């Protein structure tokens, strides 16, 4: 276990404002979640905390201190705008990318939508998707990290 | 048959007189059987064409094909010189066409494209938008912004206002905007807008603005019309009193003109100059609405928009700003 990598991951979680992060790598996995309510940023869509339950936030919390293998240090792909994150082109269709998938420069990773402006986020590097830091339908902030690619 | 002869066939029929299959075939260099096939295809696309033994074919629908010269003639010179206008018989989608067309061929030219029939017209998030042949206006325009994507907040709403102005210039005033940018008459949809960002959104970015406006859809043969449309809709010709004055070419020119004007102003001042106009025509104002996201929803009373176009929603104890999600009206507050 590399404690520096865990630390980096925790920092990443704190920066991003998301409530839970799970990384799977082969047999090993780590999940970091925070128990505090999701942060209310002024320009984001704010929702009552009951509307966004954090699944198993407390039950799995100790996982953050358990087995860790290669952690996603790598290139961060950030959201260029405030909006909603969509993993696929249309409801029900396959996600653009999944963890472990290799992507080329210019390959579509996701769609960020705000007020009917659709933004297909393309990868600016080639590599493997190490982490997807948001869930389908999540509100995202300007500059928020969406993917880690190495 | 190629796309040109199809337009030519419609042009021959547009006088709404009888023409024999033989005559039409001779004009277009096709066999009578080929003409018959094409008539069938046009009928499937919604055109009302009667076929009478020994007389031939006669077009019953009102039809006005889009014409590049007619549209350009209606534009002010300075706008005419800036755009590259293309009109297609059929495309999968006008947005897709402009998204794919190579940028930077001539960076000063604004590509604009119109299509008589979209075979895979696109709405938001995989929703389809299909209309009968030569009844709607499906227009896309590609525009380069010097700013990054974060400055585009409100562009959707400003585009809605540009369409609203277009309709007012064509004697249709009783239209409202449903946030972010659907145009509605009552609860019926008249037009929709889809904006897509091209390429790198972090630097100077380009957008393709797609507009679908129903003009004479209701005059088409109902069996072929408005496939896959899952909501109440209306068209311009149903909403105006002087139906003979409705011209697709004039509306198309007016739309291009209002869009270009809006974009110049938006680039300088953002959404602010459009906010008042939007709020005056806000279809959701004071109504209870539901905003749907994958796996969750939020309800409240709509109370206008903020300076960057976000929808203000009154919840029990607070006002929140909505920037995305599917908005639907729950119940009429009377």
Image (cartoon, helix red, strand yellow):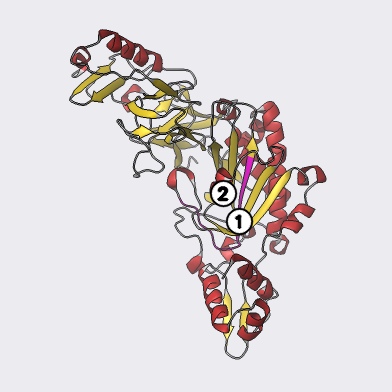
Of B207 and A103, which appears nearest the observer? A103
Q: Is residue A31 visible?
A: yes
Marks 1 and 2 close (CB-CB < 8 Å): yes
**Residue B165 on image: x %, y %:** 69, 44
**Residue B19 on image: x %, y %:** 66, 83
Residue farthest to the bottom? B54
**Marks 1 and 2, how far apart at CA:** 10 Å
Residue underneath mark 2 = B97
Identify the magenta region: B128-142
- Badge 1: chain ID: B
Q: Is residue B164 visible?
A: no
- Disc nearest the viewer among 1 and 2: 2
Q: Is residue A98 magenta?
A: no
In the image, which disc is placed on residue B115?
Answer: 1
Above or below for B225 versus A48: below
Disc with the residue nearer the chain's start (1 vs 2): 2
- Mark 1 secondary-structure assignment: strand
Q: Residue at x 29, y 18 (%)?
A: A71
């Amino acid at each position: 276990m590399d404690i520096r990598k865990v630390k980096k991951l925790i920092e990443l979680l704190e920066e991003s404002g998301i409530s839970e992060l799970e990384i799977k790598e082969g047999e090993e996995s780590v999940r970091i979640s925070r128990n505090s309510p999701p942060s209310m940023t002024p320009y984001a869509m704010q929702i009552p905390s009951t509307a966004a339950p954090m699944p198993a936030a407390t039950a799995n919390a100790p996982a953050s201190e358990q087995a860790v293998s290669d952690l996603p240090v790598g290139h961060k792909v950030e959201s260029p705008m405030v909006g909603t994150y969509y993993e696929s082109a249309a409801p029900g269709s396959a996600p653009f990318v999944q963890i472990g998938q290799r992507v080329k420069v210019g390959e579509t990773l996701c769609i960020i939508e705000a007020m009917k402006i659709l933004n297909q986020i393309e990868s600016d590097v080639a590599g493997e998707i190490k982490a997807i830091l948001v869930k389908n339908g999540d509100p995202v902030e300007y500059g928020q990290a969406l993917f880690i690619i190495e | 048959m190629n796309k040109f002869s199809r337009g030519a066939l419609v042009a021959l029929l547009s006088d709404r007189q009888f023409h024999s299959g033989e005559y039409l075939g001779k004009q277009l260099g096709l066999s009578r059987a080929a003409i018959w096939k094409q008539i069938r295809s046009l009928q499937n696309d919604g055109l009302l064409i009667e076929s009478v033994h020994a007389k031939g074919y006669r077009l019953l629908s009102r039809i006005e094909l889009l014409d590049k010269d007619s549209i350009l003639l209606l534009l002010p010179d300075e706008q005419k010189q800036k755009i590259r206008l293309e009109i297609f018989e059929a495309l999968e989608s006008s947005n897709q066409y402009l998204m794919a067309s190579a940028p930077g061929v001539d960076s000063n030219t604004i590509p604009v494209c119109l299509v008589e029939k979209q075979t895979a017209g696109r709405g938001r998030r995989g929703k389809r938008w299909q209309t009968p042949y030569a009844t709607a206006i499906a227009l896309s325009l590609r525009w380069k912004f010097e700013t990054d994507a974060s400055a585009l907040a409100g562009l959707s709403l400003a585009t809605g206002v540009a369409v609203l102005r277009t309709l007012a210039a064509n004697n249709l005033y009783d239209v409202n905007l449903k946030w972010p940018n659907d145009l509605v008459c009552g609860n019926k949809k008249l037009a929709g807008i889809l904006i897509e960002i091209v390429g790198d959104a972090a630097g100077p970015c380009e957008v393709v603005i797609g507009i679908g406006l129903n003009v004479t859809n209701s005059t088409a043969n109902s069996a072929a019309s408005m496939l896959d449309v899952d909501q109440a809709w209306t068209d311009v010709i149903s909403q105006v009193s002087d139906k003979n004055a409705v011209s697709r070419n004039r509306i198309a020119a007016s739309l291009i003109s209002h869009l270009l004007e809006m974009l110049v102003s938006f680039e300088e001042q953002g959404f602010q100059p459009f906010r008042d106009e939007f709020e005056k025509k806000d279809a959701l104002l004071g109504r209870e609405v539901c905003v749907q996201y994958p796996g969750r929803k939020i309800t409240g009373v709509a109370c206008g928009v903020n300076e960057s176009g976000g929808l203000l929603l009154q919840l029990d104890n607070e006002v929140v700003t909505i920037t995305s999600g599917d908005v639907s009206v729950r119940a009429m507050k009377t």
